[in-house]
Image: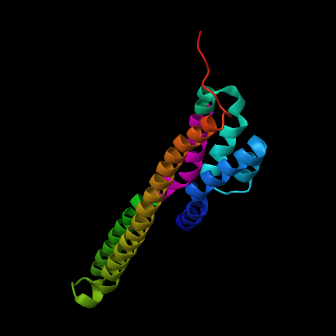
Amino acid sequence: MAIERIVYLNLATTNTKKLLSNIENALASGGVEAAKDVCRNTRGPVASIFYQRLDRSDEGVEMVEKSIVSYGGVQMGLMEKGMPWIALFIALAPMLGFMGTVIGMIEAFDAIAIAGTISATVVASGIKVALLTTVFGLVVAIILQVFYNYLLSKIDSLVNDMENASISMIDILIKHRVATPTMKA
């Protein structure tokens, strides 16, 4: 799940400066439809948001901004998909390890009860189970925590990129007179 999110988020990364430049060139040469084609042929949430913005460009800047906020929320949900499950596994892994610790200690005490004496050989296998399960639980949690933090930083970076690029996109639309501010009576 963590690897899928890493691949998805890395594929969602777009060179927004290049995309904005391509959209501006398309608007200048071929209009809104040409700019929409640029967005259709570019992967990632920024291109999807720009497409939505261009699709509503005839409705005025206010409507464009509202649609972008809504569609930005959809894109955000797609980027965060699966993150709660990763967080759950980070919390569960040490708990399962500690449960194994308890089971191993129970085995050690059962061995003592059966043998009737305490010796290292009697309790060694139970303690081994206890230690191994603790180690495995902690290793899984540590690895997942590293992935989780990387994913959170990647999502934050993409969201900041989307917000900055959205501001630039509105400026481009106004510059090319594709979206004009609506007048309120």
- Assess whether residue 78 is covered by the magenta stretch: yes
Position of the N terminus, as image quadrant, is bottom right
Q: Quadrant of the C terminus?
A: top right
The image's colouring method is: rainbow
- Furthest residue to the bottom? 121
Magenta stretch, overall SS = helix
Residue at (58%, 32%) from the top-left corner? 65
Residue 39 position within the rendered picture, expressed as x and y whole percent measured from the top left: 70, 51
Give the residue drawn at x 60%, y 25%: 181
Q: Please state the horizontal and vertical placement of residue 96, each as a whole percent of the image.
A: 41, 65
Q: Quadrant of residue 127?
A: bottom left
Looking at the rendering, which quadrant does residue 134 occupy? bottom left
Residue 97 spot, x, y in % from top left: 38, 69
Residue in view at x 43 percent, y 58 percent: 153
Looking at the rendering, the stretch of residues picked out in magenta corresponds to 67-87
Residue closest to the eye, 144 or 28? 28
Work out whether residue 174 can be spotted: yes
Mark yes or no: residue 45 visible.
no
Assess whether residue 84 is covered by the magenta stretch: yes
In this view, 145 is above or below 33: below
Judge whether 151 appears above or below 111 on screen. Answer: above
